[in-house]
Amino acid sequence: MSDAFFHPVSGFDLPRFAGVATFMRLAHVPPDHARFSQVQLGLIGVPWDSGTTNRPGPRHGPRQLRDASTMIRAEHGVTGLRPFEARNCADLGDVAPNPADIADTMDRITAFYAQIKAAGIVPLTAGGDHLTSLPVLRALAADGPLGMVHFDSHTDLFHSYFGGQMYTHGTPFRRAVEEGLLDPKRVVQIGIRGTAYDREDRDFARAEGIHIIEIEEFHARAIPDVMAEARDIAGTGPTYLSYDIDFVDPAFAPGTGTPEVGGPNSFQALQVVRELAGLNLVGADLVEVSPPFDPTGATAYLGASIMFEMLCILAS
Ligand code: MN
Ligand code: MN
């Protein structure tokens, strides 16, 4: 049973529209807080989108996700799990980016997550664009390469953009494989679709043994079957979960920079996470929520709901 300090504020004690918005209405426990060492599961914002190559905005994601997450109640609707009672959960605050310097920002993110890893806290991150995952992996994979389950419309495995730019939200997992942060044979990418410049990313995946489940195959098979294969690929070793909101059909998640039609609906978006129970997860992220393209707030609410599914998996 977790410490009551780490339980979210109930809507019966303070209405959901009132108070300062933290992730899931949890206590704000930055690293200099006296309770930091007691946190087991930390929610973190990375308000940064310098890796974005087209429509910007995910730098505004964490604040919008915090607001939308005040809708989340304490008990899971399907499993009945009460994650905030299973683990000491807290909002660890935001990593402060340097919006004018990509390398400096990545170093700041890696330093922040190294501190979290040293404290034994499992991180659940709200991005930020998908380049955010690279500096997080640099910290979490310090002891050896990780497996990864990756939901996305895109592989994010490209070599470079714009004639040699190596650090964009289309390249993080190419760098992560090159840097030995991921074991490519334990990586599965699910939901890949849309038009492309070329197949250079797929060629790299094939050469490295990365498993891609494209959207045609995803829709043709039942989700429990797809996810059983994903669990087999990731295996029993330490594994990271990375979730780009553009995995979901833009009818349900329009608020993102690189939407691709023909994706899963919002029910399936949650179901795929639930099917990851049993994996040895060392962290997770939800990236690419872009509030400027999300006028109804539906994308942020779905994003917060996906984060709750992830939290339940990380806490069980
Ligand atoms: Mn992505
Ligand atoms: Mn994507």
Image (spheres, rainbow, N blue to C red):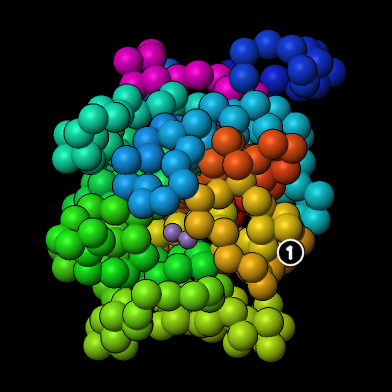
Identify the amino acid type marked 1. Asn
Residue at screen point 22% across, 64% down: 160
The residue closer to the viewer here, 219 or 187, is: 219
Query: In the figure, is residue 95 to the left or right of 289?
Result: left
Residue carrying label 1: 265
Q: Quadrant of ligand 1?
A: bottom left
Query: In the figure, is residue 235 to the left or right of 28?
Result: left
Query: In the figure, is residue 226 to the left or right of 270?
Result: left
Of helix, strand and loop, which mostly describes the magenta segment? loop
Q: Secondary structure at mark 1?
A: loop
Residue 307 belongs to magenta span: no
Would the CB of label 1 be found within 8 Å of ligand 2? Answer: no
Range covered by the magenta-colored residues: 22-34
Q: Position of residue 67 (x, y in %)?
A: 65, 26
Work out whether residue 206 can be spotted. yes
Work out whether residue 133 can be spotted. no
Q: Position of residue 113 (x, y in %)?
A: 29, 38
Q: Position of residue 32 (x, y in %)?
A: 32, 15
Residue 283 drawn above or below residue 65? below
The residue closer to the viewer here, 28 or 56, is: 56
Q: Position of residue 26 (x, y in %)?
A: 59, 24
Q: Residue furthest right?
A: 12
Quadrant including the N terminus: top right
